[in-house]
Image (cartoon, helix red, strand yellow):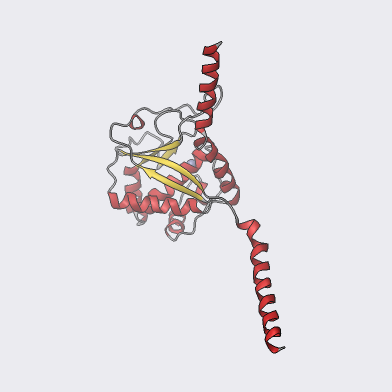
């Protein structure tokens, strides 16, 4: 009798735990998505800084369940050259590339986007989607006394988010804020800045532009071959 009571207690305890687990599961399952990013480093950023920077950006995008595959194309890659500055999406073919391109530069003239660490071209069809002025990152590093990888990692996350959101609009605070004060950078350094819920939803929706180019190509090929056979 005693042992069957014990057994019943164990069974009900297990059922309770299992019940709690199954009650939580439906809300928590958000599939991880992957984004390929090509980094054209024309600023000769030290390897250690680059490694920590990508880890910092990885951490920031993890809240959106986004896993980034970082690649560095060869020096002669076509992604190193040319910039599509058109900002409007009207009458344009979509970007058929299955990856996003980041270019890191030095020697930025003071007249180019004064005060900005970089800019995003959400609708670029060739060249870079994101350009970062690494010389300004270094200057800011000294001014606010925060490691370069923290500044570069957050600047990258900010500009990459613009591309995925398909917008150059800013929020009043957080990672998509337009103006970053030394106080913002201290929060960033402490790991206290994060994407907001609506930004995460937009980022995940924007990933589709960089993840499903292949079916479009296949459909076009099918259309081309059917046109040729007529
Ligand atoms: Zn911005």
Q: Residue furthest top?
A: 230
- Closest to the observer, 85 or 75: 75
161 lies left or right of 82: right
- Closest to the observer, 146 or 48: 48
210 lies left or right of 22: left
Q: Which quadrant of the figure has residue 186? A: bottom left
**What residue sits 52% from the left and 24% below the top?**
93
Q: Position of residue 116 (x, y in %)?
A: 41, 41
Q: Position of residue 214 (x, y in %)?
A: 50, 31
For the image, the number of numbered tags is 0
Q: Quadrant of the C terminus?
A: top right
Q: Which quadrant of the figure has residue 109? A: top left
**What residue sits 53% from the left and 12% below the top?**
229
Q: Position of residue 42 (x, y in %)?
A: 30, 38
**What residue sits 52% from the left and 17% below the top?**
224
- Closest to the observer, 114 or 212: 212
Q: Is residue 6 in sight in this rendering?
A: yes
- Closest to the observer, 38 or 82: 38
Q: Is residue 115 in sight in this rendering?
A: no
Q: Residue furthest bottom?
A: 2
Task: Please tell me whether residue 1 is drawn above or below residue 29 in the rendered image.
Answer: below
Task: Please tell me whether residue 230 is drawn above or below residue 43 in the rendered image.
Answer: above
Q: Quadrant of the N terminus?
A: bottom right
21 lies left or right of 58: right
182 lies left or right of 78: right
Q: Position of residue 154 (x, y in %)?
A: 43, 50
């Amino acid at each position: 009798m005693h042992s069957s009571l014990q057994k019943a207690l164990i069974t009900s305890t297990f059922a309770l735990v299992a019940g709690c687990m199954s009650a939580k599961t439906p809300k928590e399952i958000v599939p991880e998505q992957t984004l390929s990013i090509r980094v054209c480093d024309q600023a000769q950023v030290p390897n250690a800084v680059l490694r920590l920077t990508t880890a910092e950006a990885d951490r920031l995008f993890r809240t959106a369940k986004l896993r980034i595959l970082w690649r560095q194309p060869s020096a002669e890659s076509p992604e190193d050259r040319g910039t599509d500055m058109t900002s409007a999406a009207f009458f344009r073919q979509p970007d058929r590339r299955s990856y996003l391109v980041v270019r890191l530069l030095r020697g930025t003239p003071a007249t180019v986007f004064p005060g900005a660490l970089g800019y995003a071209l959400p609708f670029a069809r060739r060249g870079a989607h994101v350009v970062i002025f690494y010389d300004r990152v270094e200057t800011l590093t000294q001014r606010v006394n925060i490691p370069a990888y923290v500044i570069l990692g957050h600047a990258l996350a900010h500009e990459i988010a613009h591309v995925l959101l398909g917008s150059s609009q800013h929020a009043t605070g957080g990672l998509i804020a337009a103006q970053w004060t030394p106080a913002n950078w201290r929060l960033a350094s402490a790991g206290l800045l994060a994407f907001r819920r609506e930004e995460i939803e937009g980022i995940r929706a924007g990933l589709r532009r960089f993840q499903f180019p292949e079916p479009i190509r296949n459909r076009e090929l099918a259309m081309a071959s059917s046109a040729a056979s007529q």
